[in-house]
């Protein structure tokens, strides 16, 4: 495996897998270009080192073949502007015409291939399709961590056609290094804050983390499944009755492994799921009918902050309340503030998962944490301890 920092790109076409699956409005205007910006350092490294870049990505979910609304032509203008280079657009991602365009690239030039998912062979991980893609480059750079958990043609299978010339881009490199700082080599104590509505969506992550963490803070809607499992009253709070035994088992394993499991003891309850609801602070196990818990209470927040601020490594995945409503964002904001405070004192902090990242951005904490992961499913699967095909393919595992 090569490293992008010391690879010689002189005169070479770097075939770079990025994640340009960006949100777009009805006028085909990009509403959030974070993913494009995240890929720029890798692309610039190639073209500033005497190479040319052939960029490939999926975009949207085309059903069967090309659809104009999912064409890369809607991205090429904005991409060119951000990169500061007039990016060429290929009519397809494979074929003789595309190969001719890639072969004709001069050092410093960039070619954007058409949407990979216009071909069903991409998601099927078809080897012949991967081989055709590989004809467009002299080396392969995987910089799409968001799709690293998929064994697709462009994210994993293609690696076999670049046995000695494959590497991670800067984005994946930093994602993996940052995650490994949390999972494989943390400074102690290691605290994970897992929030969100459902135990069911986080169960395998929680189980995997119990082997690694010193402190596990569970917040958000999943709290009430644990409360009910212990005989408490949760009123109309979100609760997964099918997971009551699972919740009890998690508590049992945590106790056996010496993990400090922390959950809300008091909550902000509301008489409706609304930003204008009436509220009361009440014990987490004594929520009356007609009321639901929507945020952590002051006693719980104080406990969360104390644990977080005394941590050496912190992972945050999921808010501890309905932060979208300001009235119920106090707990999540306090968690963010505590993480920033701990980071200032030298802790390594990683925030991942769409809701946590949105929370950090809402309150302006992005500059105060060590790393913000851009990945969704890939991040969760890495935290679950799964092998990601897109990572294993580059490492030759």
Image: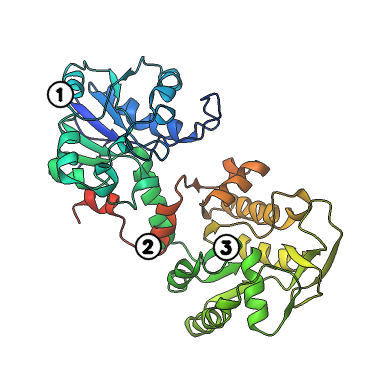
User: Which circle, 2 or 3, is nearer the viewer?
Assistant: 3
In the displayed structure, would residue 97 be above or below residue 275? above
Q: What kind of element bears circle 2? A: loop
Residue 184 — which label? 2
Question: Where, quadrant-wise, is the C terminus in this rendering?
Answer: bottom left
Left or right of residue 24: residue 5: left
What whole-number distance in Å separates the C-alpha atoms at marks 2 and 3? 17 Å
Q: Earlier in the sequence, mark 2 or mark 3?
A: 2
Query: Which label belongs to residue 96?
Result: 1
Mark 3 element type: strand
Instruction: Return the x and y of residue 54 as percentages of the image width and height.
Output: 26, 27
Label 2, label 1: how many angstroms apart (C-alpha)? Answer: 45 Å
Q: Is residue 308 above or below residue 30?
A: below
Res 306 → quadrant: bottom right
Q: Position of residue 197 (x, y in %)?
A: 61, 62
Residue tagged by mark 3? Answer: 193
Q: Neighbour class for label 3 at 10 Å: few (<14), some, many (≥20)?
A: many
Few, some or many residues within 10 Å of mark 1 (<14, 14–19, 20+): few
256 relative position to 139: left or right = right
Residue 35: image quadrant is top left
For image coordinates 14% across by 46% down, the residue present is: 160
Residue occupying image coordinates x 39% and y 22%: 73
């Amino acid at each position: 495996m090569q490293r992008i920092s010391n690879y010689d790109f002189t005169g070479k076409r770097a075939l770079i897998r990025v994640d340009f699956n960006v949100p777009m409005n009805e006028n085909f205007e990009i509403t959030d270009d974070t993913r494009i910006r995240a890929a720029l350092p890798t692309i610039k490294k190639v073209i500033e080192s005497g190479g040319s870049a052939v960029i490939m990505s999926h975009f949207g979910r085309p059903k069967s073949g090309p659809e104009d609304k999912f064409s890369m032509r809607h991205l090429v203008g904005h991409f060119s502007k951000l990169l500061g280079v007039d990016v060429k657009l290929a009519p397809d991602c494979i074929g003789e015409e595309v190969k001719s365009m890639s072969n004709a690239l001069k050092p410093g030039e960039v070619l954007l291939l058409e949407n990979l998912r216009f071909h069903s062979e991409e998601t099927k991980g078809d080897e012949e399709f991967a081989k055709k893609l590989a004809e467009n480059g002299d080396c392969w750079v995987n910089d799409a961590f968001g799709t690293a958990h998929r064994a697709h043609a462009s994210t994993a299978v293609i690696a076999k056609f670049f046995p000695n010339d494959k590497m991670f881009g800067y984005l994946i490199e930093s994602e993996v290094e940052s995650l490994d700082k949390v999972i494989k080599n943390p400074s102690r104590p290691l605290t994970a804050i897992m929030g969100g509505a459902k135990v069911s969506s986080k169960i395998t992550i929680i189980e995997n983390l119990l082997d690694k963490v010193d402190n596990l803070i569970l917040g958000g809607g999943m709290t009430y499944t644990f409360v009910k499992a212990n005989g408490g009253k949760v009123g109309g709070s979100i609760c997964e009755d099918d997971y009551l035994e699972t919740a009890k088992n998690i508590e049992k394993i945590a106790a056996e492994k010496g993990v400090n499991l922390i959950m809300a003891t008091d909550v902000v309850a509301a008489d409706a799921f609304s930003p204008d609801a009436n509220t009361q602070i009440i014990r987490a196990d004594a929520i009356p009918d007609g009321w639901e818990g929507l945020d952590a209470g002051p006693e719980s927040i104080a406990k969360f902050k104390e644990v977080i601020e005394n941590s050496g490594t912190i992972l945050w995945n999921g808010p501890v309340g309905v932060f979208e409503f300001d009235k119920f964002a106090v707990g999540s904001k306090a968690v963010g503030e505590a993480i920033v405070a701990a980071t200032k004192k030298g802790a390594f902090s990683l925030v991942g998962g769409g809701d946590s990242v949105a929370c950090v951005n809402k309150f302006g904490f992005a500059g105060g944490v060590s790393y913000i992961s851009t990945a969704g499913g890939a991040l969760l699967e890495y935290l679950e301890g799964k092998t990601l095909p897109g990572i294993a393919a580059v490492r030759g595992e």
